[in-house]
Image (cartoon, grey):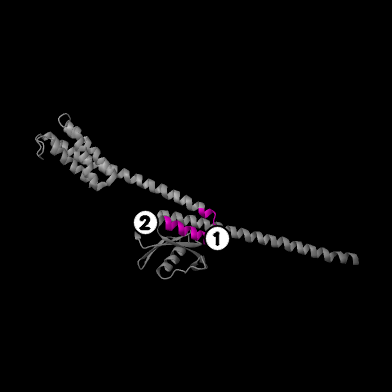
Amino acid sequence: MLWVIAACSLATLLAWPWRDLLDPANTAMLYLLAVAVVAARAGKGAAIAAALLGTALLDFFFIQPRFTFTVGDVQYVVTLAVMLAVALIIGNLTQGLQREKEAAQERERQSRALYQLASQLAGALTLEQIDAMTRRFLHETQSCRSLLLMRHGEEVLSALPGQTPLSGKPYYAAQAALQQGAAQATLDGALHWLILPLHNSPQARGVLALSSFDLGLLGNERRPLFKAIAALVAASVERLHFVELAKQTQLQMTDERLRSSILSALSHDIRTPLTVLY
C-alpha cells in the first residue's frame, strides 16, 4: 500500500501545476504510468488498488467540478471508465512480465547450480563422495536433506557404512521407487519424503531420498529440478560402476597374461631336460 499511495500521490503532484493546461485524458497517462510501476514493484493486488485510487484522484482533482466526485461532463465518465480498464490491463500485463522475468532468473540460477553440481560429481571417486557432495548441495541450495541408497539384491541399503537404512513408510516408498522406476512421495510424521530412482526404469542402481519438514520444498514445482539432480547422481554412479568393471577386467587380463607366462616358463623348463635325455 505504501507503493500505491506514493506512486499515485507523485502522479498527482506532477500533474497539479498543469491542471488548467492539460486535458484530463492526458493527465490519466501519469496515473497509468504509476499503475505500471506499482505492478512491477508490489504485485497484482497493489496494481488493482493503484488503478482504483488513480481513477478516484483523477476525478477528484482534475475533472470539473473539482474537489468532488461528481462528473460534470458525460464524456469524462467514459474517460474514467477507459482509464480504469486500461490501468487494470496494464497492471495484469506488467505483473505477468515480472513473473516471467523472475521465472527466467530462477531457471538461470538452477542451471548454474546444476552445472556446479555436475562439475563436482565429475571428480567423485567413491559413492561416499557422491553422497556427501549431493547432501551438501541440496542443503545449501534447496534447504532439504538427502540420502543416497544403493541396491543390494532386492534390498535397499545405505551406501555409507555409518548411515542407518530407511524404515517404515520411507523404506516402502524407496522400494516402490526402485521397483517401478518412478518418483514416490510419502509422509512420515511431520517429515515429508520424496524418493527418486537413479534411473527411469526398474533396473535402477539405487534411489535418492529427499526429506524436509516443509511440503512446499518438495512440491511439484521443484520436481523437475530434483529429477535433474537425481539424473546427475545416477550418471556419476554409473561412471563409478563402469570404472570398477574396467579395473576388474584389467586385473583379469593381467592375471591371464601372468598365468600364460608362468605356464610357458614351466613348459620350457620341463621340455629342455627331456630333450637332452632324448
**Element type at mark 1:** loop
Queried whether the magenta region covers residue 100, the answer comes back as no
Residue 44 image position (x, y, % from top left): 26, 47
Residue 249 image position (x, y, % from top left): 64, 60
Q: Which residue is drawn at 38% across and 55% down?
A: 222
31 or 273, nearer to the observer: 31
Tell me if I can see residue 85 in this picture: no
Outermost residue on the bottom side: it is: 168
How far separated are the C-alphas under marks 1 and 2? 31 Å
Q: In this view, does 203 lie above or below 107?
A: below
Please say if the residues under marks 1 and 2 sit with CB atoms less than 8 Å apart.
no
Q: Is residue 155 above or below residue 37?
A: below
Q: In this view, does 153 lie above or below 111?
A: below
Crowd class of label 1 (few under 14; some 14 to 19; many from 20; radius 10 Å): few
Q: Mark 2 points at which residue?
A: 220
**Element type at mark 2:** helix
36 or 155, nearer to the observer: 36
- Pair 1/2: label in front: 1
Q: In which quarter of the image is residue 59?
A: top left
Q: Which residue is drawn at 82% across and 63% down?
A: 268
Residue 269 image position (x, y, % from top left): 83, 65
Give the quadrant of the C terminus.
bottom right
Residue 174 image position (x, y, % from top left): 44, 65
Q: In this view, does 166 lie to the left or right of 51?
A: right
Tell me the amino acid under the disc marked 1.
Answer: Thr
| The label number, if any, that marks residue 126 in the structure image | 1
* Span colored in magenta: 120-140
Q: Which of marks 1 and 2 is nearer the N terminus?
A: 1
Tell me the amino acid under the disc marked 2.
Answer: Asn
Q: Residue at x 16, y 40 (%)?
A: 57
